[in-house]
Image (spheres, rainbow, N blue to C red):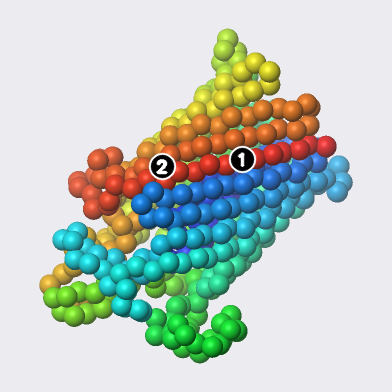
Amino acid sequence: MVVAVIKNKPESNCLSSLMVAAIVLPGVVSEASAAAAPQKKEAGVELLYYHEHGEAIDVVSPVMYGQFAPTAKSTVEISAVYDSVSGASIWNTSDRTGLTAVDTSSGASTSSSSDSRKAINLKYSHYLDAFSWALGAGYSREDDYQSASASVELKKSFNKQNTELLLSFGYGVDEIRLPNSSDDDDSDDDDDDDDDSGSSEKEKNTWSMLVGVTQLLSPVSLVQSNISFTSGDGYFDDPYQQSLNPATNQTIDDTRPSSRQQWAWLTRYNHFFPKFNSSLHLDYRYYLDDWDISSHTLALSWYQPLPNDWTLRPTLRYYNQSEASFFVATLPSTTVTGDFSMDQRLSSFGAISVGAKVIKKLGNNMRVTARIENYRQSPDFTFSNGSNVDDWQATIVALGLRYTF
């Protein structure tokens, strides 16, 4: 079981970062039970390309991973990620009536942007008889955002190692440097990273806990279920989302509550079919927060070994969410006060992902993977009472290499 803390960056590339983190990491990080430390060393690399259709946002993300065992009862894992984001950046939004959004920083409707993120994660695990503990730390940095996190994890196996309990805690601190919309683009100051004039910093603190159980049901099936809770306080606004209301000539900033509490329940069922030498993976996740957003995620994967050490894994995933209480689909005719956002990611919508992964073993120690996935969100996919999102698609392609020695 892998527990990851992903920051909620307040800018238009947030969805890209979230997709990269969600798709890359689970395929790279290895798993180990509480009973025994893995004795083999591993190293891996994966290159991911993410493309948003129409929005022209592209992400290139190489990921490196390594694991080694300094002693017979311990392991050290390290992963490093570099995200390079480029494409169109929309500073603000337009409502569903078709009013044109205006970039209040430059007077243009859209602007090009580029961004990069560097992140590193470390984890030390120590294994005892039917028990293990682990300490983790992570750090991520961008031009206008940095995040640091720490975690502790406890695992206990019993019932002849057919049952495993998991308890983990995490804490993170995010620092957001707000953009200065009045900056002069022709400034001769080349040391922007050290110049804080005209800008300000905000902070967000988040802590989380997770309780989970994995139960072997039979020699060919197991079920895993966990419940997580996350509580955050601080700055949740998106400073890159602004709207100009022509009815009142008011520039409306994206303003969200200063706290957020989130609950999630995830259940996984894996079953191996000896007759076909194949396995079925079925996942369901329910999410709820105090912004009135609730969501359902259902994922289905099939692992099919093929001749000559090939494996094929098709995947189908469905996602549906309700809208936040402060989401607004159309600009009001009066002056806006209080929490307000026209960010479509806070609206109700449904999404379907279809993908496939191919795995090829090269000898006993090397494995090569190739993956492609198409993600589409649409108002037609939601079972909520209406939706205010546009039809939108993204494609993800990834190539990976893993070596065990």
Please, what secondary structure does the residue beneath circle 1 have? Answer: strand
Query: Percent x, y for residue 311?
Result: 61, 24
Please give the residue where the numbered disc 2 appears in the rendered image.
375
Q: On residue 231, which mark appears?
A: none
**Residue 223, quarter of picture:** top right
Number of residues whose C-alpha sits closer than 10 Å to that of mark 1, classed few (under 14), some (14–19) or many (20 or more): some
Q: Amino acid at mark 1?
A: Leu
Determine whether 186 is above or below 11 in the image.
below
Query: Observer-nearest residue: 24 or 48?
Result: 48
Callout 2 amino acid: Tyr
Q: Looking at this rendering, what residue extends furthest in the right direction?
A: 71
Q: Position of residue 208 (x, y in %)?
A: 53, 58
373 or 27: nearer the viewer: 373
Front in this rendered view, residue 331 or 125: 331
Side of 278 where 379 appears, left or right? left
| Residue occupying the point 24% across, 65% down | 94
Element under label 2?
Answer: strand
Residue that label 1 marks: 399
Check whether the beta carbons of the residues at disc 2 and disc 1 lie within 8 A of each other: no
Residue 304 appears in the rendering: yes
**Residue located at (67% from left, 55% from top):** 80
Q: Position of residue 54 (x, y in %)?
A: 36, 52
Dot in front, 2 or 1:
1
